[in-house]
Amino acid sequence: MADFSLGIVGLDALGSALIRRLDQQGIGSTATDLNSRLLQAHLAGGGSAPAGSPYDLAQVCDLILLAETSDQTAREAVLGSVGLVHALRPGTIIVDMSDAAPQTGPALGRALRSKGAIWIEATPIGSPTDARAGKLTLLTAGPAEALERVMPVLRAVAAKILRLGELGTGPLAKALASCFGALSIALYTEMLIIAKRTGLDPAGMLDALPLLAPGMGTAPAALSAQVLTGGYQSDTPGKRLQDDLARVADAARASSTPTLFVSLLQAAALAASHSLLATGDSLDVARWMSDNAGVAFGADGAPPAA
């Protein structure tokens, strides 16, 4: 990594995990965040002295990982009053790892083109724990030569690096996977509800599926671990699912692709978020479906307390 001075913009859970992992791999970095509270937490946790702003960081770093958590903060970090744009040097490589809409990264990359900056996408799949263990999957896009140059950094945090297409494809692929995973859970939940209402044992039905329908593949683990137990807790917030659904719906409209199931799941997620039993989890959809059907999953035969 002698060829680069590395910076990280964004000190939420992912950014902090990336710093820890890179430190463990002997790759030092300068970090910053627009949120002063996160900067102070970084220092309190033993992090190196951070840059005061993205502007300050851009003056000393020529490889920058952007790990923001929303479209708004990504735009502010890049184009805001103390954003990267005001101090970028030609040839600086920015690796976008932000949790933002598919359109945001490409738009920011275009805005920086006149500065001579090179925009790369490395959408992370996995948790901050995976990042700390170097087990992320990265969905990459951008100039092949620049990607090859930064591979030592990417390989330090990822077990698998894939290339799916042009800029914007990583966030869209991640949103598609999230939506259709949630849709799969909803479809299976409906089957389990029907099974219970008609006198079938839902757990037995789930166990029998690989034999009854061998082409269906493996049922989502959340069904037995959370839906049938009445737990309804996953690693995905309900707001995150709604954002992913909106991103997929936007992409479908832009490509003139008709949708049926995505629209139905959007409506269900919205209704579930207003349920009296809602906890803000993506599995609130399954809870709402069961509640509406008058079916209680769980060992004690009653739905868990909200």
Image: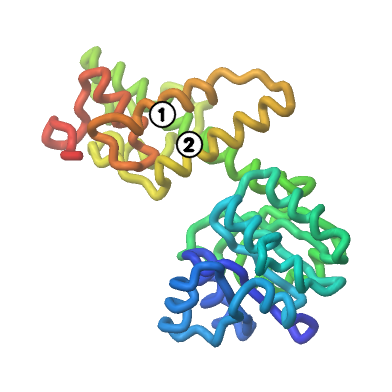
- Examine the image and state in which quarter residue 69 appears: bottom right
In-image side of 301 versus 261 (left or right): left
Q: Residue at x 48, y 29 (%)?
A: 183
Q: Nearer the viewer, residue 90 or 223?
A: 90
**Residue position for label 2:** 242
Q: Nearer the viewer, residue 1 or 198?
A: 1
As drawn, 188 above or below 122? above
Q: Earlier in the sequence, mark 2 or mark 1?
A: 2
- Label 1: how many Cα within 10 Å (few below 14, some 14–19, many 20+): some
Say whether residue 255 is visible: yes
As drawn, 37 above or below 197? below
Disc 1 marks a residue whose amino acid type is Leu
Say whether residue 133 is visible: no
Rendered location of residue 53, percent (x, y)? 61, 74
Disc 2 marks a residue whose amino acid type is Gln
**Residue position for label 1:** 270
- Label 2: how many Cα within 10 Å (few below 14, some 14–19, many 20+): many
| Real-space Cα separation, disc 2 to disc 1, in angstroms | 8 Å
User: Do the numbered discs 2 and 1 sit on residues whose CB atoms are within 8 Å?
Assistant: yes
In-image side of 238 versus 152 (left or right): left
Q: Secondary structure at mark 2?
A: helix
Residue projecting furthest to the left: 300
Q: Residue at x 29, y 21 (%)?
A: 193
In-image side of 229 versus 93 (left or right): left
